[in-house]
Image (cartoon, rainbow, N blue to C red):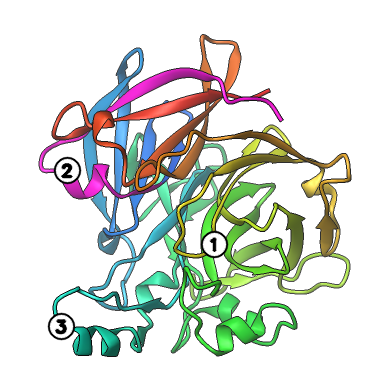
Amino acid sequence: MSDPFLLNRVLLQFQPPAAEIIHQLSAITTTPDGSLWLGSDELNTIERLTLVKPSVYANHQSFSIGDFLPLRDEDEIDIEGLEYANGYLWFTGSHSPKRKQPKGKKPDKDIERLAEVSIELNRYLIARIPVQSGELVKSCAHPKKSDRTLTAAYLKTTESGNLLTEALKRDRHLGVYLANALPSKENGFDIEGLAIRNHRLFLGLRGPVLRGWAVILEVEMEADDAGMLTLKPIGKDKQLYKKHFLELNGLGIREIVFCKDDLIILAGPTMELEGEMRVFRLKHLLKQDGDSLTSQTSDNLEILFNLPFTIGHDHAEGLAIARCFDQVDGLMIVYDSPNSIRAIQPDAILADIFQLK
């Protein structure tokens, strides 16, 4: 493991008021036109910035997800993953129940609040929206195949989640966590990463971590006759999903992104804890035809570096691959609860780019 090397910092400039955005960034991705797309875990919008000069992104546009897809209520989606692939911007909610927090005013009421676990159905959303000329649209012609149309769609929902969570309730490893609605940040089921390659979606789980082993789910989706997304059987056994278990020193997955054919993994504490965030590289994931288990004793999983750690601030959340100086692979990182020194203006925040080796 090497020390992290900071290649650059970039300024993300938003339209005011943007306090909710810059302090709660949870996911980022890029599109081929150079746009930077961002999501927040407290809003139901997706933000777009463009590179206006070296190391400065601005021209902020905000897109309300409800304009493209039907939302199930007024609650947050809790966007935890963004990825661009095949003309679509894909995103995922956390799929996690949450426990109410004490307010610190009346102990009796706070004790009651700690007993309340709620399920917000918007969090159980995995969806895609077409991108055309830097804009999100409900539908458009395929940029390379004139006989095809790109359309906004989402994984078919159920009364308590979606087709994926319904399938996982019967899973021998994960089913108990979904069936009992264990909250996020208490080692409950919690999606916090999304990466796509070859039409396969890889979902990184912050929790549960099983005896120190983190989990990535692999799925493929297809549209049915009604235009809804369904799970397509995959792998040698034609199951609806594959599970990949990783030895990440007891940490959960906080974000993932492909760099060429390697998966870069941001890992951090599963529980509501302050602790170091660690970056890993996973090789040969795309060659796994079934469930897999990868330890650090293999040549397929390596620790790259630990991120600088400050208690209470700079919780790394979003990853994107960024080229620096036209030749060096960099890892762009945005933060939830950023240190105040990053907010150099009321509506602007600094993101980091670390060197990838």
Write down the residue under mark 2. Answer: 18
Specify which label sits upstream in the sequence, 3 or 1.
Answer: 3
223 and 83: which is toward the camera: 83
In the image, is residue 265 part of the stretch drawn in magenta? no
**Element under disc 1:** loop
Of badges 3 and 1, the one in the foreground is 3
Q: Is residue 76 left or right of residue 355?
A: left
Percent x, y for residue 168?
A: 64, 80
- On the question of residue 67 being in view, the answer is yes
Of badges 2 and 1, the one in the foreground is 1
Q: In the drawing, what numbered circle is on residue 106?
A: 3
Q: In the drawing, what numbered circle is on residue 40?
A: none
Mark 2 residue type:
Ala
Mark 1 residue type:
Thr
Mark 3 residue type:
Lys
Write down the residue under mark 1. Answer: 270
Q: Are marks 2 and 1 in contact (CB under 8 Å)?
A: no
Q: Are marks 2 and 3 in contact (CB under 8 Å)?
A: no
Percent x, y for residue 123?
A: 40, 70
Specify which label sits upstream in the sequence, 2 or 3.
Answer: 2
Percent x, y for residue 231?
A: 64, 71
Cα separation between marks 3 and 1: 28 Å
* Highlighted magenta segment, given as a residue range: 1-26
**Element under disc 2:** loop
Q: Residue at (59%, 75%) from the top-left corner?
A: 164
Q: Residue at (15%, 83%) from the top-left corner?
A: 106
Classify 171 as above or below 140: below
